[in-house]
Image: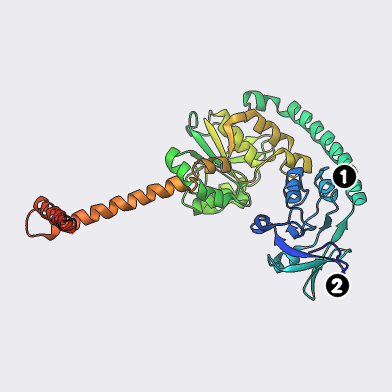
C-alpha cells in the first residue's frame, strides 16, 4: 500500500477498502494506509479524530464532509496530515463495497476495484473546505438570528400557555404522579416501542400516541390512553379504540380533521394554540397534568437540529422541552437501563445454574430408580460409590 506509488502500474492511491459506514465492521480493522469508506455528513471533530488515529491514506464519504449547514472542523483535521478526501461518492459505492478488497483511488476521486470503476466523487481540498466553512458560519448566524427572533415572538404569543398552562384541556385521565410514554412518528419509533416492553410492563405508563404513531401502538398490542394529532392520518380502528382524542386547533378554534371525527362518531376535545407540533402538545398535556416522568419514543430533538435548521426544530419545541426539564427523557435512555450486557459474571452464573440443574436431575434419577424409598435409594447408591472408591485406594 502506498500513496501514489512510483512502482505501481496504474496511477492513484492503492490500499485495502474498509467499510466504516453504519453497520460495517471496517473501523475495527482499519489500519494505516487503508481506504476508509464512511457515510457521515458534517463530520465532527470526534469522528474525524477516530479516523485519524487509524491513519488511513484516503477517506471516501458517501455524503458530504460538510454540507454547509454548520461550520464543522472535521474536514480541516482530516486534511492536515495530507489524507485524500473524496465526498459524494454515492450510494452505489456503498452497495458495491466489499470490506477487505483492494481498491485504487485516482487523483480526481474515482474509485476502482481491480479493473472496474465503481464510482467516484468530488475531491475536497483545503481551499474548498475553508470556503464551505466560512459560508456555513455566516449561514448559521443568519438562521440563529431568525430562530431567536421567532422564539421571542412565540413567548409573546404563548407566554401564559408556557407559564400557567392556559388553554391546556383536561383529558379526564389520571396522569399526576404517573409515568407517561409519548410515541411520535420517527424512523425508529416502532423498534423503540418493542425495546420498551419491560418498562411498559413494569410501570404501566399512560400511553400517548401522536399522529400515525398511535396506529403503530395498536398494531403492537398497546392501546393508547390518549391520541394527539390530526385524525386524517390515523386509522379508524385506532380512533375507535377507546382512547381520548385531542385535536390540535388554531387559536380561533378551527381543528383540521374534525369532520372525520364526527363521521366516525368519536368524541374529541380541541387544543387551541399556535404550536404546530402534535408531539409538543402531548408534552404539554403530560407535563401540565403532573406526569412524574415523560419518556419520548420517536423523532429526537437536539441542538444540532436547531443549528441545521431542521423542520421540527422550532422555538416551541425548544421552549417546551426546556420547560419540562429533567422530567423528559429519550426512550433510548430507558432502553439502556433495561439492557444487561453479557460478561464473564453472567456466564459464570449460567454455568453454576447448569451444574445445579444437572446435579438435581441425577439425584432425582437415583432416588426414583431403586426398589426402596427415595431416601433409601440415595443412601444405597452413596454407599456403593464409597465402597468402590475404597477398593481403588487399597
> Could one spot residue 267 in this view of the protein?
no
Displayed quadrant of residue 5: bottom right
Residue 286 image point, x, y percent = 56, 33
Mark 1 or mark 2, whichever is nearer to me: 2
Residue 111: x and y in percent read 81, 67
Residue 375 in the image, given as x and y percentages of width and height? 11, 50
**Image: 377 above or below 141:** below
Q: Is residue 377 left or right of residue 120?
A: left
Mark 1: secondary structure? helix
| Quarter of the rendering occupied by the N terminus | bottom right
Q: CA distance from mark 1 to mark 2?
A: 34 Å
Res 203 label: none
Residue 133 tag number: 1
Closest to the observer: 316 or 329? 329
User: What residue is drawn where x is 13% and y is 60%?
Assistant: 369
Sequence-wise, which precedes: disc 1 or disc 2? 2
Residue for point 64% across, 46% down = 299
* Residue on which disc 2 sits: 10
Provide residue 315's location: percent of width, then percent of height.
74, 35
Query: Which quadrant of the rendered structure holds the C terminus?
Result: bottom left
Q: Is residue 6 visible to us here?
A: yes
Query: Which quadrant of the view contains residue 86?
Result: bottom right
Which secondary structure lies at badge 2?
loop
How crowded pointer 2 is (Cα within 10 Å; few <14, some 14-19, many 20+) is rated as few
Taking the view exactly as shown, the residue that stands out farthest to the front is 394
Vertical arrangement, residue 116 with respect to residue 245, above or below: below
Amino acid at each position: 500500500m502506498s500513496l501514489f506509488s512510483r512502482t505501481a502500474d496504474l496511477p492513484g492511491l492503492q490500499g485495502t477498502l474498509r467499510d466504516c459506514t453504519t453497520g460495517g465492521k471496517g473501523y475495527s480493522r482499519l489500519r494505516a494506509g487503508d481506504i476508509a469508506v464512511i457515510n457521515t455528513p458534517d463530520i465532527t471533530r470526534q469522528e474525524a479524530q477516530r479516523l485519524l488515529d487509524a491513519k488511513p491514506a484516503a477517506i471516501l464519504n458517501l455524503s458530504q464532509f460538510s454540507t454547509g449547514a454548520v461550520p464543522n472542523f472535521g474536514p480541516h483535521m482530516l486534511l492536515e496530515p495530507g489524507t485524500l478526501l473524496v465526498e459524494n461518492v454515492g450510494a452505489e459505492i456503498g452497495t458495491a463495497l466489499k470490506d477487505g478488497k483492494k481498491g485504487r483511488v485516482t487523483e480526481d476521486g474515482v474509485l476502482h476495484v481491480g479493473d472496474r470503476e465503481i464510482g467516484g466523487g468530488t475531491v475536497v481540498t483545503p481551499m474548498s473546505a475553508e470556503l464551505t466553512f466560512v459560508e456555513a458560519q455566516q449561514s448559521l448566524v443568519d438562521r440563529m438570528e431568525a430562530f431567536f427572533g421567532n422564539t421571542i415572538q412565540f413567548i409573546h404569543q404563548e407566554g401564559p400557555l408556557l407559564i400557567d398552562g392556559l388553554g391546556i384541556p383536561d383529558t379526564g385521565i389520571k396522569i399526576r404522579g404517573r409515568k407517561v410514554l409519548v410515541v411520535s412518528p420517527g424512523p425508529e419509533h416502532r423498534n423503540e416501542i418493542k425495546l420498551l416492553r419491560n418498562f411498559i410492563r413494569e410501570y404501566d405508563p399512560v400511553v400517548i400516541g401522536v399522529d400515525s404513531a398511535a396506529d403503530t401502538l395498536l398494531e403492537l398490542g398497546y392501546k393508547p390512553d390518549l391520541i394527539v394529532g390530526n385524525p386524517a392520518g390515523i386509522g379508524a380502528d385506532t380512533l375507535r379504540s377507546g382512547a381520548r382524542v385531542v385535536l390540535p386547533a388554531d387559536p380561533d378554534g378551527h381543528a383540521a380533521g374534525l369532520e372525520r371525527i364526527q363521521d366516525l362518531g368519536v368524541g374529541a376535545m380541541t387544543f387551541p394554540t399556535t404550536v404546530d407540533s402534535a408531539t409538543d402538545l402531548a408534552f404539554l398535556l403530560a407535563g401540565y397534568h403532573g406526569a412524574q416522568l415523560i419518556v419520548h419514543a420517536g423523532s429526537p430533538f437536539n441542538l444540532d437540529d436547531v443549528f441545521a435548521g431542521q423542520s421540527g426544530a422550532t422555538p416551541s419545541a425548544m421552549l417546551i422541552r426546556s420547560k419540562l426539564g429533567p422530567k423528559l427523557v429519550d426512550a433510548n435512555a430507558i432502553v439502556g437501563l433495561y439492557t444487561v450486557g453479557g460478561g464473564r459474571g453472567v456466564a459464570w452464573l449460567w454455568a453454576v445454574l447448569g451444574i445445579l440443574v444437572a446435579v438435581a436431575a441425577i439425584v432425582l434419577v437415583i432416588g426414583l430408580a431403586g426398589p426402596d424409598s427415595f431416601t433409601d435409594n440415595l443412601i444405597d447408591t452413596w454407599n456403593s460409590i464409597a465402597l468402590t472408591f475404597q477398593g481403588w485406594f487399597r
